[in-house]
Image (cartoon, coloured by chain):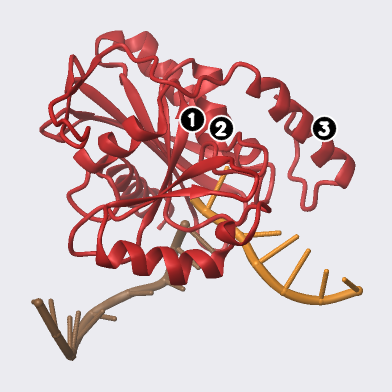
Chain colours: A red, B orange, C brown
Amino acid sequence: MSVPTVYDDNPSPAQRDIWAREQSELKSRLIEVDDLDFKKIILDDKGEKVEFEGLHYIGGVDVSFVENNEQDAVASLVILKYPSLEVIYEDFKMVKLKLPYIAGFLAFREVQPLLELLNTIRQANPMIFPHIILVDGNGTLHPRRFGLASHLGVLANVPTIGVGKNFLHIDDGERMTMSYVKSVVKEALRKGGNSHILQGDSGMVWGAAVRSLESTTNPIYISVGHRISLETAISMVLKCCRYRIPEPIRQADVRSREFIRNHFS
DNA sequence: GCGACAG
DNA sequence: ATCTTGTCGC
């Protein structure tokens, strides 16, 4: 992957073009249907009650940042037992970031250390290598349908789900705008269903706004990462939510911040 | 030109 | 993303 050796404050339009093409090439390997090493069992005639047989380990990844410092960060991987959601593994990696945050290019900033964390556990203890990974960032809910979750999934060849805490605007009509989501979608979720499919004027389905708890009105944004369908991704995320943010990601987040407290202050 | 924009 | 305690409410 093409990332600079030294910190680049403001990557050129030419560089961004190269990255966009790299994403498009990797996207040819993207699988947007269920291709899982465990079984999805539909119990309900409406397809709402779902069970996962043979699913034992779920991963969560995140990158947290050190205050007053654009370059120091900590990448984290946690593995949770399913369905108990107890954390059985955690690992951290201190990172020197080479790029700032640029919407649409998050993977080039964060994916490398996450891959290294996955390689570590794959070698050390393949028995608990996660069957699926929840990623702090989007998958197909992305201008080129290839966000961090998809990027990581393809490179590591592991099923992933994209989980966004905030909505990423995509240029595909008014139903994909921030204001539409904040008004129409949030109101719809408040009243009724658990999820709202995010579909643009082009007919493209980008992901879903999901109300993860009965008690919350602020949705999370779920999208296909790799080797899973959107509907399966949604039901799996719902099974991982003790709070608004699914446990694998919440744990990765909380623990990496704790790691930072203990090592940078 | 300005606005919009995951983490 | 991150700085942060209490507090209002079901």
The residue lying at 48 percent from left, 15 percent from top is A157
The residue lying at 40 percent from left, 58 percent from top is A265
**Quadrant in which residue C5 is drawn:** bottom left
The subunit letter for the residue under badge 3 reads: A
**Quadrant in which residue A95 is drawn:** top right
Circle 2/circle 1 CB separation < 8 Å: yes
Q: Secondary structure at mark 1?
A: helix
Residue at image mark 2: A111
Residue at image mark 1: A114
Spatial distance from mark 2 to mark 3, Cα to Cα? Answer: 17 Å
Front tag of 2 and 3: 3
Q: Secondary structure at mark 2?
A: helix
The subunit letter for the residue under badge 2 reads: A
Q: Three-letter amino acid code at disc 3?
A: Ile
Residue at image mark 3: A18
Q: Position of residue A133 (x, y in %)?
A: 37, 29
